[in-house]
Amino acid sequence: VYQYLRPLLFRLEPERVHTLAIDALALASEHPGLLRLLKLSYGVSDPRLHTTVFGLTFPSPIGLAAGMDKNAAAIPAFLALGFGFVEIGSVTAHAQPGNPKPRLFRLPADQAIINRMGFNNIGAAAVARRLAGLRQRGVISAPLGINLGKSKLTPLANAPEDYIHALNLLYPYGDYFVINVSSPNTPGLRELQDKQHLDTLLAQVMAYIAEQPARKPLLLKIAPDLSEPQLDDVIALCLERGVSGLIATNTTTKRRQLRTAIDEAGGLSGKPLGERALEVLRYLNRQLQGQLPLVAVGGIATADDVMSRFEAGASLVQLYTALVYEGPGVIRRMSQGIVAQRRRDPHASIRQ
Ligand SMILES: Cc1cc2nc3c(=O)[nH]c(=O)nc-3n(C[C@H](O)[C@H](O)[C@H](O)COP(=O)(O)O)c2cc1C
């Protein structure tokens, strides 16, 4: 169906289509009948997809990447589409409008997107209220990740308090949390990946978590544009501070080998990001030797892409841009590919 729908959707402004899609999925999330229909059309369920990482059991290792459902509007619908987990956000401590429009661009010839959304979101307090309602209704049937960003107005020096403010409001509702220091669209944010900043930030966030009655996993999401020495620093700090895992990668500010002539600031995602994201994953895996679980994201669109990430050490994968180019059917196709592979070689995941 999506191959017929796509040309129509691609005639509309990208952000308009995004809003329409989220509104439709939010509506479906309120109606058990519609959720059943989505599950029937797109859902997947197979014990061979079950994955346990950082103490959580995922019905499938394929998750929705941050940025698609920033405000937790449509979690039940995304799960019905076959995702094994959803990562909402980035959520910031304070509500904010994000950058001026247009801020989202399609590059169809590259199967890529450039975005400079700038953490548009309703803020941690409003998201917490939504999640409280969803938890009460018991409609979140798989692990929920909450990705946290820094409020634009908060100076870099106060970043730790800003993240902890949001974390504190959202802590009861997430199964794992992500500190996002890798978005290119909040001025100065990626400097938080530097050794000194990152150490202070992780120390304070981990101290907050240590005080909570339930300790929940904290992951760090990093940029694909870090050098190997920078990655080494990140690894050392994560191990030292007791971070539960790494998400690699966010979008890139580089513009390598694009077919599309486009001069827009922002982060590039999709196909052209895949190679670099995989390279970073391989490097992390080589240095970590299994000491930390890895979540792969960036340019994943097929079952082969997923298998290459597993082989490179990932325990889970996420996607965003492939949904835009392939439609929701891509989740089932990828899942069936993994199941088929595991049927042929049932020990593959154990060997890894
Ligand atoms: C429009 C858009 C908005 C995004 N917003 C966020 C965000 O708020 N927080 C975040 O950590 N990543 C965000 N991302 C990055 C994705 O989570 C993902 O890391 C990246 O797009 C690479 O995956 P992909 O190639 O499958 O899209 C965004 C990506 C896109 C395309």
Image (cartoon, helix red, strand yellow):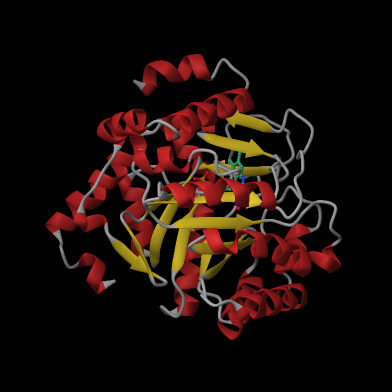
In x, y percent, where is residue 287?
49, 78
Which residue appears at 42% of the width and 41% of the height?
76
In x, y percent, where is residue 85?
41, 52
- Hey, which quadrant is residue 71 in on the image? top right
Between 204 and 328, the one lying in front of the other is: 204
Which residue appears at 48% of the width and 26% of the height?
24
- Hey, which quadrant is residue 219 in on the image? bottom right
Between 283 and 55, the one lying in front of the other is: 55
Between 87 and 349, the one lying in front of the other is: 87
Q: How many marks?
A: 0
In x, y percent, where is residue 13?
63, 21
In x, y percent, where is residue 304?
31, 49
- Hey, which quadrant is residue 14 in on the image? top right
Viewed as shown, does residue 85 lie left or right of 221? Answer: left
| Residue 279 visible from this viewpoint | yes
Which residue appears at 66% of the width and 76% of the height?
208
Q: Is residue 2 above or below residue 177?
A: above
Q: Is residue 15 above or below residue 272?
A: above
Viewed as shown, does residue 238 lie left or right of 82? Answer: right
Viewed as shown, does residue 30 lie left or right of 1? Answer: right
Which residue appears at 60% of the width and 81% of the height?
210
| Residue farthest bottom in this picture | 240
Q: The N terminus lies in which quarter of the figure?
A: top left
| Residue farthest left in this picture | 344
Q: The C terminus lies in which quarter of the figure?
A: bottom left
| Residue 64 visible from this viewpoint | no
